[in-house]
Each structure stands twice: as structure tokens, then as C-alpha cells.
Image (cartoon, rainbow, N blue to C red):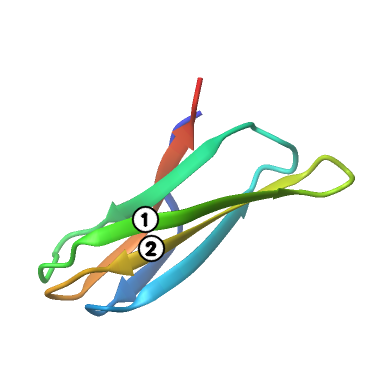
Amino acid sequence: MAFNNVGPLTFLAAGQTAGWSFSYGDDHGTQFATADVKTPNQGGVHLADQQRKVKNNAGVATYFVNITNQGPGGCFHNLQGGGVA
């Protein structure tokens, strides 16, 4: 299941990192998220890394990702991504 434009718009200046988490209320298997970079863009290049997953005893999975703006300028983003089929 792919997704785009998820979560609040978040501005990152060059060098800043935002930590994100998302959940579906159950376990959707492997899920990856990246930055859904918005325009206008002041030259920001967003790197998604540290993809993580935790599953509680009720079977609910929460997914995590860090988004870092490698610069040289700032930019807004939220999340896009999906699962491995």
C-alpha cells in the first residue's frame, strides 16, 4: 500500500533532522518511508535513514524513519512510502 502527503508539513534547514513515526493499527509487514519533498524548494536534499519497526504484544506495529536535509537550502516535506509486496 503506497502513501503520499502523509503528516504535517515540516520545514528542515540544511543539516536538520526530523524523526517520524507512523502506524496502521496492526502489522503491515515491511514498510519504508521517504520525504515527500514540497516546492518551492530552496535546494534541500532529503535523506531518509534509520528505518525501524517495533511490534507490541497486541500485534500493532509502529514504523520509524529519520529525515535529514543535506542542504544546501531549506525545504518543507512530509512522508511518502509504502510496503514491500
- Farthest top residue? 85
Assess disc 1: are there few (<14), some (14-19) or many (≥20) residues with their C-alpha within 10 Å of its C-alpha: some
Viewer-side residue, 59 vs 5: 59
Residue 4 in sight here: no
Question: Within the image, what quadrant is residue 14 found in?
Answer: bottom left
Kind of residue indicated by mark 2: Ile
**Which one is in front, 10 or 63?**
63
Q: Residue at label 2? A: 67
Q: Are marks 1 and 2 in contact (CB under 8 Å)?
A: yes
Residue 48: mark: 1
Which residue of the protein is positioned furthest toward the front in this rendering?
Answer: 50
In this image, 49 relative to 40: left or right?
A: right
Q: Residue at x 30, y 58 (%)?
A: 47
**Label 2 secondary element:** strand
Decide: is 53 above or below 17.
above
Image quadrant where residue 77 sits? bottom left
Q: In the image, is residue 56 above or below residue 41?
A: above
Task: Please count the marks in the image.
Answer: 2
Q: Position of residue 36 (x, y in %)?
A: 32, 52
Residue at the image position 51 percent from the left and 19 percent from the top: 85
- Position in image of residue 71 (x %, y %): 17, 72
**Is 16 left or right of 83, judged from the image as shown?**
left
Horizontally, residue 34 falls left or right of residue 64, namely left
Which mark identifies residue 85? Answer: none
The answer to which of marks 1 and 2 sits earlier in the sequence is 1
Residue 56: image location, x then y, percent: 82, 49
Determine the secondary structure under disc 1.
strand
**Residue 16 position in % (x across, y down):** 33, 78
63 is higher (above) or lower (below) than 10: above
Looking at the rendered structure, the kind of residue marked 1 is Ala
Q: Is residue 52 visible?
A: yes
